[in-house]
Amino acid sequence: MVEYKLVISERERSIARTVADPQAAGFLGKRIGETVGGELLGASGYTFRITGGTDRSGFPLRPDLPGARQVRLYVGDGFGFHAPRRGMRRRRTFRGNTISEDTVQICLVVDQRGPKPLAELFAAS
């Protein structure tokens, strides 16, 4: 059974929601940057864009790393590592950009709004 915690951001607000099968199965195989229809979450008229996430060990999904594999990369200042000194680099663990069974959290951003506000749609469920 697959279960994801979704963090949906809409301007200055964010809403957390947990989804399990069969809704969660619609996210399997999707990549960072792809759009998901709101019908999957019960929010018709909305479209959401996947912006990131984390796996079960807490490692972030990296948009430029293909697949769902876990990799240790040597990174400088930027995504996943903020160097305390200029030019400093470290080896950090990342997960690929594809959502798999190992993913726990998925971050979404509203691309297109629907007729009802999100807070109203998700408050009842």
Image: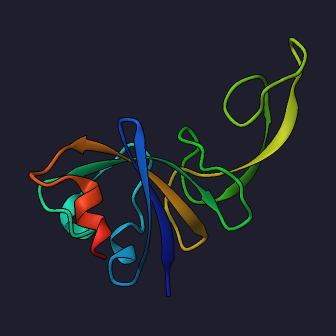
Report the residue at 42% width, 64% height from top: 29
Report the residue at 71% width, 37% height from top: 80
Residue 27: % across, % down: 38, 66
Query: Would you identify the image quadrant in which residue 36 lies?
Result: bottom left
Chosen colour scheme:
rainbow
Residue 66: % across, % down: 54, 48
Give the left or right position of residue 90, taking residue 104 as reference: right
Residue 125: % across, % down: 31, 76
Report the residue at 73% width, 51% height from top: 71
Report the residue at 17% width, 45% height from top: 113
Give the left or right position of residue 28, taking residue 46 as reference: right
Count of picture labels:
0
Query: Would you identify the image quadrant in which residue 64 lies?
Result: top right
79 vs 20: above or below: above
**Residue with the most extreme bottom position:** 1
Residue 3: % across, % down: 50, 78
**Residue with the most extreme top position:** 86
